[in-house]
Image (cartoon, rainbow, N blue to C red):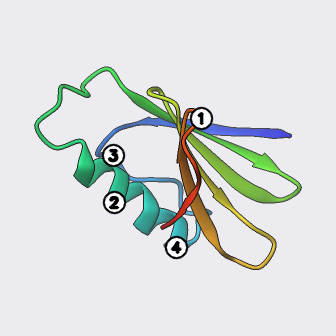
Amino acid sequence: MQLGTRWTVGGEPPARVSPAVRAAIRAVEGDLLGRDTTQWRWTLTWLEGRPVVELDDGTVIREGHDGSVTTTLDDDDAHDA
């Protein structure tokens, strides 16, 4: 695993993140409208060359070998982004 970077909710994701992962990030952030997320951060790591993006609330976005993107929250079932 390789550490990437951190950024605030609503900020610009790193340029290396694919458009599909960016769309998943924006979808999660859209679901957070109206909540105080001023102290929340995204953390980007790389696992086997693919991004794993985690939000402080436990939301995790992963890009698979085939380019598919899944979003999970804690122990919830994965759903396609």
> Regarding mark 1 in the picture, which secondary structure is present there?
loop
Residue placed at 17% from the left, 31% from the top?
35
Question: Mark 4 belongs to which amino acid?
Answer: Ala
Image mark for residue 20 = 4
Q: Are marks 4 and 3 in contact (CB under 8 Å)?
A: no
Residue 77 x, y percent position in the rendering: 58, 49
Q: Which of pointers 3 and 2 lies earlier in the amino acid sequence?
A: 3
Q: Is residue 19 above or below residue 54?
A: below
Residue count near mark 4 (Cα–Cα under 10 Å), binned few <14, some 14–19, many ≥20: some
Q: Which of pointers 4 and 3 lies earlier in the amino acid sequence?
A: 3
Alpha carbons under labels 1 and 3: distance apart: 26 Å
> Regarding mark 3 in the picture, which secondary structure is present there?
loop
Image mark for residue 75 = 1
Tag in front: 4 or 1: 1
Q: Which residue is mark 3?
A: 11
Answer with the quarter of the image where residue 65 lies.
Answer: bottom right
Question: Mark 2 belongs to which amino acid?
Answer: Ala
Residue placed at 83% from the left, 59% from the top?
49
Q: Which residue is mark 2?
A: 27
Question: Mark 3 belongs to which amino acid?
Answer: Gly
Q: Which of pointers 1 and 3 lies earlier in the amino acid sequence?
A: 3
Residue 74 x, y percent position in the rendering: 56, 33
Residue 24 x, y percent position in the rendering: 45, 62
